[in-house]
Image (cartoon, grey):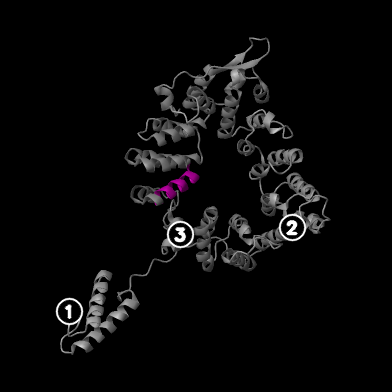
Amino acid sequence: MTSTTRTTAWEELVTSALLGTDRRTPPVDLVPPGKEAPLALLDAAATHTVRRRAGLRPAAAGPLPEPAPHDSRRVLPEPARRRLAQLLADRAAPAGSGGRRGAAPDLTELLPQWLAAADAHGYRAPASALPALLDAARARTDLRPLVLRFAGPRGLWLARFNPEWKFALRGSSGGSVLPAPEDVPAVRRLWEEGLFAERVALLASVRAHDPAAALALLTGTWPTERAEDRLMFLDSLRSGLSDADEPFLEQALSDRSRNVRATAAELLSALPHSALAARMAGRAATCVGLDRADGAAGIIVEAPHECDAAMQRDGVVPTPPSGRGERSWWLGQLVEAAPLSIWAARLGGRTAAEIVALPVADDWGDELHAAWCRAAVLQRDPEWSRALLGAPAAPSSTGPGTSSLAERAKLLATLPEEERAGWVAAFISAHGLSEAFQLLGVCAVPWAEPLGRAVVDALDIARDAGSYPWSFSGVMGLAERCLDPAEASRLELLTATPDEAEGASPGAGGYWSEAFQRLVSTLRLRAAMHAELALIG
């Protein structure tokens, strides 16, 4: 009986009860014969009341689900298991009132670090913690990759039984166990017969094991795939991208889908020896050259006058964004896609630093440098990134490449970790913390000693100056997550409440003391977490 039928039957009984059985006889199908109408009405009402409260009619039990797949990773040590339960319980605890964080560590922000460390040690998630882990990932999208790696195949298996955890199945194998990449018949069968999520996960798995085998899978079914699926599959080639992928990507430049063509062009641009890179290099070289007209070397720019069909096939978007000129838009795309190695020969054998320092005629400098910045990031070229970043102590507005902190962060990400930390430390020493937040976000964790010391020294200077502590809450939060835990003892001196300087913000000293107490407590807690994970289970 459907819910609509039950509702109608109940309304019929209510109507008969209100009007009286003498005036409104209940329907025969609701009131069995052989009883007086009032008694039959009450019996029918009692029966329907039980049905309404139960919500569902009893049904035969369904088959049991298949057992959860095996997870061969190491068992989590008991102290680490207790710590995980504490972190997950704190995530669900109600937030305090008033907005003041207090001196206690923020366990919610330590959960990502704990998950990353547990995964690095090769531990599997305790079965009892899987529901809380999936709930945490549902509430915080930034946790999802970490949680799903730690939860492993059992987490995906469990996610199938709760609609609120369906996010875990998107882009994954849907909870099924993938075949080993070297099991060619099983891989081929799943690739040809599997669901889309299974195929995406399979392609990523095979790509990590054997890039050529993954490319062969994709090539075999490419013409029959839907456009949106082709785009997702093509994106998987970013992992392990090499010159061996060029023939396939070159064919994809003629794909029916504009998004697929654009992605193929982007991937080919990251291959400096590809035919597309050579074509872009030829175009860019006709636009940018050395100018010796006034006796002093400089750069002269002649932007393209049209965006022809060949350029569009190679990924150049013809229509610029609102407020952007066509010629500068086309120029930027050509220079961005051209290999950076061409410019030394084109511009007199100069190094990247010397090229970036040359004056650019007719106000094309910003456009040219911005395109070189994008190329350095795309091609992961540290020499050009160093040149475009310039000296960390130089004012941002006079930098050789870009004054944008977001662009500088991308350039920094191409440098080795130690060099990156040293550059940001020098930047903080010269400019303070107010402009460094985005730059700190690309530095390896835990911060190297010079960077950690520069951050703490800058915070100490702000504290002694009586600055508003709330202005530095973001950096303080980063320090809690990124400072080396060994720094805790050195920071003890800063936990005392300082004397308030003249003109200081009222109560700032107490807030600073509280913030440094929290920082020290958090660093010590992080040290304990890592020690617990290092135990032999």
Circle on res. 27: 1
Of tags 1 and 3, which is closer to the observer? 1
Identified by mark 3, the residue type is Leu
In the depicted structure, whether residue 359 falls above or below residue 224: above
Q: Earlier in the sequence, mark 3 or mark 2?
A: 3
Q: Secondary structure at mark 2?
A: helix
**Can you identify the residue that label 2 sits on?**
511
Residue 273 visible to an observer of this rendering: no
Image x and y of residue 119, in percent: 58, 56
Image x and y of residue 352, in percent: 65, 25
Disc 1: CA contacts within 10 A as few (<14), some (14-19) or many (>=20): few
**Can you identify the residue that label 3 sits on?**
156
User: Looking at the image, do the residues carrying marks 2 and 1 touch, with CB atoms under 8 Å apart?
Assistant: no
Of tags 3 and 2, which is closer to the observer? 2
Answer with the quarter of the image where residue 62 lies: bottom left
Q: Is residue 257 left or right of residue 475?
A: left
Residue 31 or residue 123, whichever sits in front: 31
Image x and y of residue 360, in percent: 62, 19
